[in-house]
Each structure stands twice: as structure tokens, then as C-alpha cells.
Image: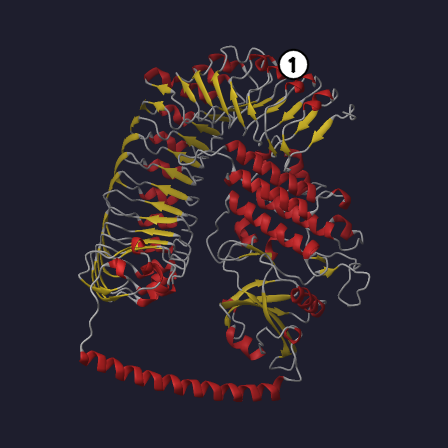
Amino acid sequence: MQCKNLRTMQLRNNLLVGGIPPQFGFLELLEVLDLSTNNLTKSIPSTLGNLTHLVSLHLDGNNLDGFIPPSLGQLKALEHLVLASNYLSGKIPHSIYNLSAMVVLSFGGNQLDGNLPSNICDAFQNLQYLLMHRNQFNGEIPISISNCSAMIMIDLSSNNFIGTIPDSIGTLQNLSTLSLSTNQIKATGDDWRFFDSLINCTFLRVLNLGDNQLQGKLPSSIANLSTSLYYLGLYLNPISGNIPAEVGKLTNLITLELGLTLLEGTIPKEIGNIWNLESLGLSGNMLSGEIPSTLGNLTHMNGLHLENNAFTGSIPEELSNMQVLNTLNLSNNKLIGSIPKKLFNLHSLSISLDLSNNYLNGSLPVEIGHLNNVAEIHLSNNKLTGQIPSTIDGCQILQILYLDGNQLNGSIPFSLSNMIGLQNLDISNNALSGPVPEFIGQMKLQYLNISFNNFEGELPKDGVFRNSSAVDIRGNSKLCGGIPEMNLPKCVLDNRRKKHYSKIIIVITCCIGGIICLCISMFLIARFCWKKGYQNNPLPFVAKNSEYQKVSYNDILRATDHFSSENLIGRGTFGTVYKAPMKFENVTNVAVKVLNLKQHGASRSFLSECEVLRKVRHRNLIKVLSSCSSIDHHGNDFKALIFEFMLNGSLETWLHPDACTNRPFRSLSLIQRLNIAIDVATALDYLHNHGPAPIVHCDLKPSNVLLDEDMTAHVGDFGLARFLVQPDSTSSLLTGSTTGLRGSIGYIPPEYGMGGQASVEGDAYSYGILVLEMFTGVSPTDERFRDGLSLHMYVEMAFSDHVTEIIDHKLFPVNDGGDKSNSQDIHDCLVSVIRCGLLCSKLSPKERNGIKEVVKELNWARVKLLR
């Protein structure tokens, strides 16, 4: 090796393959070696033990196998040893436990075995992070672990540890996370004393003991746990007795998981005092009595799971107060009465509503159509009566609908044909009748069960009906036809019906012919009128793009109901945006941006936006449908742009509650934020590197990032955009030399404020601030940023050891009862994203990351997170 004076080697987040070169062991002065998140294979070379100055060794996120070389125990200066997420096997060399400088020991997500030495903390006096989850370790947890007085996080989950939890664990006063889930740890009687000792851990935030063999009753000392505790998991344990009412004193809890235990009795009404609770899991117990109405106090609740118990009484109407609830599961209980209509006003329900296997009665409320965001509705096996309401087509996002096992009657409503996203439909075991509609064959159904009803007539042959294994039609004796595999009798029509149908066909044919003639006449008249009235007033956008539909001022006036405030969806510097029903190909709703021409620069903004949008096409850029440049009824100039309407509004309304005014505020999940960050970066990469000419957006911020029905991000508002000057360019709009303050406060790169030119580096800065805002939940204009402090500095001070402390609390890497995912992978993902944001928002343009590199790193972070 020729780089003997090299001190730092950072090669993380690339696509490196092959083995780690043994020659790295000759870099005698190396202090930092980071090869994480690549595709490296083979074993760790023992020559790395020669790097006696090494302080940090990161090899996590690769495909390394074999044993951990004992020579690593010679690295006396080593503080960070991170080998997580590989395929390492065997035992940890004992020499590793003698490295007294060790701060972070991370071996999670491997195939390591053996037990922890009884004197594990004799040398580890500085150890703060012990991460050994998802391995095959066994034996007991050493009592001496309490001697690691600096310990902050212990994660031994998903192993084979036995025995009890040491009583002395509470002496670790800095402990923030204790995760021992999915082991074989026991507790009976006095073995719960460790719980009392945890009272001394005043910084404890995560306590996960789920999926073990903890028995007996929960101690009332649960009320004395740290007030900082936000995650408590005791799921999948044979815990018995009642839920202590004292749990209501843990007022800062965000997640409480007590599912799949042996708890009985009622839900204490005191749980309604945990104001910040977002997820409550009590499923799979023996709880009984009525569901307390005090749960309606939990207005931050995202997921409520009470299924598989013995609850009685009716569904409390107060649950409708949970205006951010996305999952409600009350299935497999003994609930009675009708479904509260207010429950269907929970527009936040986006994942599932499951009330199946109860004794609910009455008709299915027409308000069911208000659930326009939910993906699954399960109402099976109740006593519901009446017809399927025609309003059900309001559930436009619905993918799964189960209404089987009720007493529903009538026919299948035609409105069901509007539910284009429906994939699974089960209406079996009811009293439905009439023909099976042809439109069902035109839907995208993958599974259909109409068995044991009273349907009659010919069975369709298209769509899902082509696959006999995907359709259940048993118990409908009057059905006929269909594909041969259905084994139905042929349909027979008598002569009288044949003659009747022949007359109908003749009448319909005549009507259609007349309508066609009328349409042709109207088209010729309209074309003549248009040529007379509009040929001298071409639209700037459509003149160069004949495929765009032409729109007049009157069209826009009618569609917006004379620019009614009820259709107003936003205001900007240069104009106002309205929602309007207008037909463009497959689009029925559009967004109309009406320019305020009295505002200085509005006309130039209109021309700039037309020029940019005329030249670009990308799935992550807002799609322009048309434009209008005309005269209003008062003789004033009128200019407007027509865009595809984005159902989920702007990113800003998903980040900040005060910006969300037209729906209940709902927070974005980690994967949603990551997907949006990738979408925006991909759009910028196209504008900067793959368009007809490099384009700088100049005003990237959350309000200019719009989300469609699938939560795909689209960058919009190109009113300030600029083409970078090309040597042979002559267009008046193609300029990259415009100076001045261009953009929005908080997102403007510093050099623009000092007269710098518009540049791709400027867009990178705005993007970096956007990413930091997305994952911290803090706006760059927050009032805390004064006296020189900025969002970039705020995040940089916490990076990377304390990154979880400044991340939006809804994204903290905790394991709930139903997810055994690796919290270290989530942590690594967050670190990668925040690093991108910091590198993009550096003060010096030359030091900023290019968008192409950002797209690559974020995509790799997503692959690792999802694998």
C-alpha cells in the first residue's frame, strides 16, 4: 500500500464487491475504516488487527461471513466496532471483551452464538451501546452487566437467552433503551424485582420485554417507571391478572403493547389519561366488559387493536374523536348494537376498519362512503341487515371489502363499479339477489366470493370470472352460463324473450345512429365558431403543443363556480389555486392556478412556468394539462395554468399540523417520507441532468411538493425556474445569471442572498433543508432558530450519535408486538438520510452533494430498510 499516512477511509454506501483486501492491515496510521453498506463478501481479514491506531471500524450492512478474527482484540484504541447485518458466525473472541476503550459494540443481525462472559463489564467501563440482537446467543444475561455504568442502550432481542433479568439492571442510571424481546427469559413472583429496580433509570425511553416467558401479575410499580418512557412492550408473555390502573400514570407513553398475553378483567378507564398514546395493542387476551368511552380522549391514536377478546356492549361513539386513527380492529369480540355513524367520519382511517365476528346489527350506514382513504373494511359475520348502500363507492381507495356472513338483501349496487381499486370482494352468505352485474367483470378484482346468496341469470365471463379458482359461486342455484370451468347450466331464452330483445336492439341502434349524426353536426358548428372567435388569440402553451386541450376563461369560470372560496385550495406569491371538475383524458378533477397579474413578476412567472413545463415530462413533476391566456368579463388580462389535481395536497400539510386545514392531520411513516425524498431527488436529477437543458427550480419547499392518491411526490410551481445558459442559446427565458433573492425564506441558499447566480447547487441546498425538515418535523423558519442558529446547525450538532433525539418522535426505531424488524437497520437508514440532508445544505456550494449521488444513496437506504 502506498498510502501509509492515511488516517480515514470512508467508503460506505457504495456498491463495492469482493473481499476486504488484507493489505488494509498495512495502513498503520489508520484511525477510521468505514466500509459499511456495500456488497462485500468473504471473511474479515485478520490483518486488520495490525491497525493499532484504529478508533472506528464499521463493516455493517455487507455480506461478510466466517468468524470474527481474534486479532481484532489487539485494537486497544478501538471505540466503535460495528459488524451488524452480515452473515458472521461462531463465538465472539474473548479478546474483544478486553478492549477497555469500547463505546459501541454492534453485532446485530448475524449468526453468532455462545453466551456472554460473566465478567463482561470488567473492561467495558466506557461501553454505551451493546447491540447483539437477531443472533443465536444463549445462556443467562450476566449480572455484571450492571457494572457498565455508562450504558445507554442494551439490545439483546431475538436470541435464545434464558434465566431471569438481573435485579441490579436498575443501577444503569443512563439507560435509555432496554430491549430483551423474543428470548426465553422467565419471571415468576420475586423475579419481577427487576421491574422495581428500573425505577432508578430516569432516562428510560424504550422497554421491550415482549415474546418471553414472563409469568404472574404485572406489578403496580409500573406507575413508577420513568416519565420519559414512550414505548412499553410486554406482548406474547403468559402474564395474567388485570391491567393495573396505575399504567395510566405513564402519561408520555406513545406505544403500549400488551397483546397475546393472559390478561383478564376490564380495560382500566385510566388508560384514557395517557394523552400522547398513539398505538394501543391489547389483542389476543381474555379481557371483557365494555370498551371504556375514555379511550376517546386519546386523540393522537394511530392504531387501536382490541381484537380477539370478550368485550361486550356497544361500540363507544367517543372513538370517533380519534381523528388521526389509521387502524381500528375490534374483531372477534361480543359487541352488540349498531355501528355508530360517527365512526365513518374517521377520514384518517387509511389502513383497516375491522369489526368482523361480533353481534352488530342494523343496516350498514350510508355514511360508510365517507371512508375515502381506507384500504380494507371487514364487517364479516355480524347481523347486519338491509341493502349495500350505493354510497359505498365513496371508498375510492378500498382494496378489500368483506361483508360475508350477514343478512344483507337487495342487489349489488351499480355504484360498486366506481371502486376501481377494489381487489378482494366477499359478499357470501347473505340474502342478496338479482343478476350478477356485467360491470364486475370490468373491475380489477383478484378474488370474488358471492356464494350462498340468491343470484340468478347469466354469469359474466370477463375479468375475474375467467379464473374459476378466483371466484366462488356455490349456493346460487339459478345462475347459468359463465366459462365451462364454472360447471353451470347453459342459459336458455324462450322465443317471446328473444323477440322482445330483438325489438330493444333495433330501437337502441336507431337511437345511437341519431346521436352520432347530432354529435357530428355539433362538432362542425363548434369548429366553425372556434375558428371565428379564437384564431386570433392563441394560447401560449397550447400553440406549441397541439395535443393540449384548449380552455377558455368561461370554461374556468364555470368549473370553479365563479372562483368560489369553497373551491380554493391554496394561495401563492403569484396566484391562487382552485380545484375544478374539468375533463382531460382520464382526469376529472384539475387544479387551476389563476395568476395575480397585479403582482410584480406574475406575467414573467407565467411565461417561465409555461416554458419549463412545455419542455419537461417526468413522473415526479407536476403534469400540466393546459393553459389559458385570455380576457375576463371586465376586459382585464387573464392567465391561468391547469394542472392534474393532487388528491393528497402538499407535503407541508403532512409535516405541520398548523398547515393542515381541510382534513385531520396525519403524520407520514418512515417509508413514506423516504419514498417522497427519493421522488423529489429523482425529479431534481431529471431537471439538472436529463432534461432538454439543465433547469434550476429555485423555489423547492414542502408547499411546492404535491402528493397524488398513491402518495407519489410531484414537484410543482416553476414560476421562478431558470434554464442554465447554454453556449448557443438565444431564448430570452434561458438565463442562469439572474441575481437577487430567489426562493422562499428558510430554503434560499446563502449565495443567492449575496447576489449569486441560480445554480443546481442552489437547488441542492433547498433540497437538503427540505430533507432535514421532513425527518425532524421542524421548519427552517421555526422561532427557535435565532441568534445565528439554523436547522442545518441544529441537526449537525446531534449527528450522528444523537440523531434519534432530533428525529420526529413518530419515527423512532422501536419494535412493536407485530414487527420484529431490526431497529439498527432503521437507525442506519435515518443516519443515511440525515447525512444526505446535511451534505446538500452545506454553506459552501462546492461542498454540497450532487443530486445524482443523493438518489443513489437514498435508494440504497430504502433497499436496506425493506430487505
Q: In the image, is residue 558 above or below residue 77?
A: below
Q: In the image, is residue 191 above or below residue 657?
A: above
Rendered image quadrant of residue 333: top left
Q: How many numbered discs, if any? A: 1
Rendered image quadrant of residue 164: top left
Q: In which quarter of the image is the N terminus?
A: top right
Q: In the image, is residue 25 above or below residue 348?
A: above
Query: How many other residues sit within 10 Å of disc 1, few (<14), some (14-19) or many (≥20)?
Result: some
Q: Would residue 683 be seen by someone viewing this image from the given angle?
A: yes
Q: Name which residue type carries label 1.
A: Gln
Give me the residue at 25% from left, 47% from top: 314
Q: Is mark 1 on a helix, strand or loop?
A: helix
Q: Would residue 656 be seen by someone viewing this image from the given angle?
A: no
- Residue 172 placement (x, y as % from top left): 51, 19
Q: How is the image coloured?
A: secondary structure
In this view, the residue in front, 82 or 631, is 82
Give me the residue at 59% from left, 61% from top: 622
- Residue 772 placement (x, y as % from top left): 62, 43
In this view, the residue in front, 143 or 754, is 143
Q: Is 25 displayed left or right of 180 in the figure?
A: right
Q: Which residue lies furthest to the front in this view?
A: 484
Q: Is 518 displayed left or right of 366 in the figure?
A: right
Q: Which residue carries the number 1 mark?
A: 74
- Residue 668 placement (x, y as % from top left): 51, 47
